[in-house]
Image: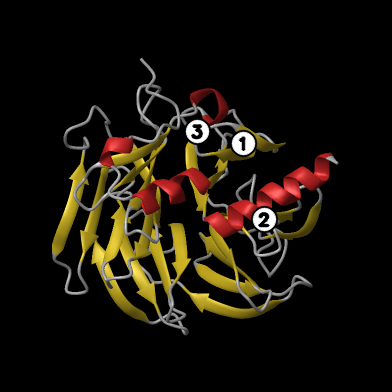
Amino acid sequence: MKRLIGSLVALSIASAAALQAAEDRLVLVSASYGKNVIAICESDGKVLWKHKTEGPQKGHAGHHDVHLLKNGNILFHDSWTKTKELTLDHRVVWEYDSAKQGGNEGKRVDVHAFARLDNGETVIVESGVGRIIHVNRKGKIVKKVPLGEGGRKKTRLMRILDNGNYLACAERPGVVTEYGAAGEIVWEYEIGTRVYGAIRLKNGNTLICSGSGASVVEVTPDKKVVWEVAKKVPGTEIELGWMTTLQELPNGNRVVGNCHAGDDDPQIFEITRDKNVVWEFDEWELVGNGLACWQILDAQQSKRVRGMIAALSD
């Protein structure tokens, strides 16, 4: 049976402040695999806003990264090569096609990750050709960062660290690599699976979603495993599928993407360091079995987005 959709397991929440934060949050999701949708939902799954995207191209699924921008627009992609900025009134106001721009014509290139910097540049990871590029608003490349050899050019998620470095995941040989500004390898952890996502935690450790490894692993800078959930969340019936996106909340809890886990398991769940699940997002009809990327919006972001959505209906 499908679990209680989007519910808060109140007995597991450590404080009233944590409960309030969960109630205030919105969830931005981007799913393909036949669903082809971007949506903004309440924490209980109620859809406030929805945008239909293009379907898969040549058997590819797309939808591997998504971000709410500071201006309230959404940075997304619905093919392997096009990165787009979308307004909440469904207008594409910026687009970059990695298959046709930047000297990639005729080359095999896939895009799985991107980000928007405060200076307006869009950072795009071009898998296959093996580079990270910075693109300005006019579509001009202003910086190129090479990815490492030995399979590191086949990437999944990338996140920009507070120090400006790039934390990127490569499916084969299954490594998480921190690159410096010029592409030098600063730190690396080999997990050995088709790793999907990684973030740098506030405590300096790295939290990794292992993709095909059906696990979430926290490792120290000296590569010691200090926290792990594998195959199944202890004390629950939640089985782990293809582990994808990660987010650390201000209260220290971790939110984890559980893709391809089937209709009996949540697509996203929030877990404490003590491994108590305190929130689940289980919206099978909306996102199906292919929700790889999402973002939990904090209270300030959620308030602004609710206002923008309300203004569109006036």
* Nearer to the camera, 211 or 218: 218
* 136 over 291 or under it: above or below: below
Comes first in the chain, label 1 or label 2: 1
Q: Is residue 237 visible?
A: yes
Q: Is residue 219 left or right of residue 151?
A: left
Mark 3 Cα shell of 10 Å, populated few (<14), some (14-19), many (≥20): many
**Number of callouts:** 3
Residue found 60% across the figure and 49% down from its top: 80
User: Where does label 3 land, which residue?
Assistant: 44
Q: Residues within 10 Å of mark 1 (few under 14, many from 20)?
A: few
Q: Which residue is mark 1?
A: 58
What whole-number distance in Å separates the C-alpha atoms at marks 3 and 1? Answer: 34 Å
Question: Is residue 90 among what the camera can see?
Answer: no
Q: Residue furthest top?
A: 1
Residue that appears at 39% across and 46% down = 19
Q: Earlier in the sequence, mark 2 or mark 3?
A: 3
- Foreground residue, 298 or 261? 298
Please state which amino acid type lies under the numbered disc 3: Asp
**Of the residues tagged 3 and 1, which is closer to the observer?**
3
> What separation in Å lies between label 2 and label 3 (alpha carbons)?
19 Å
Q: Residues within 10 Å of mark 2 (few under 14, many from 20)?
A: some
Image coords of residue 246 (percent x, y): 39, 53
Question: Is 259 located above or below residue 192 in the figure?
Answer: above
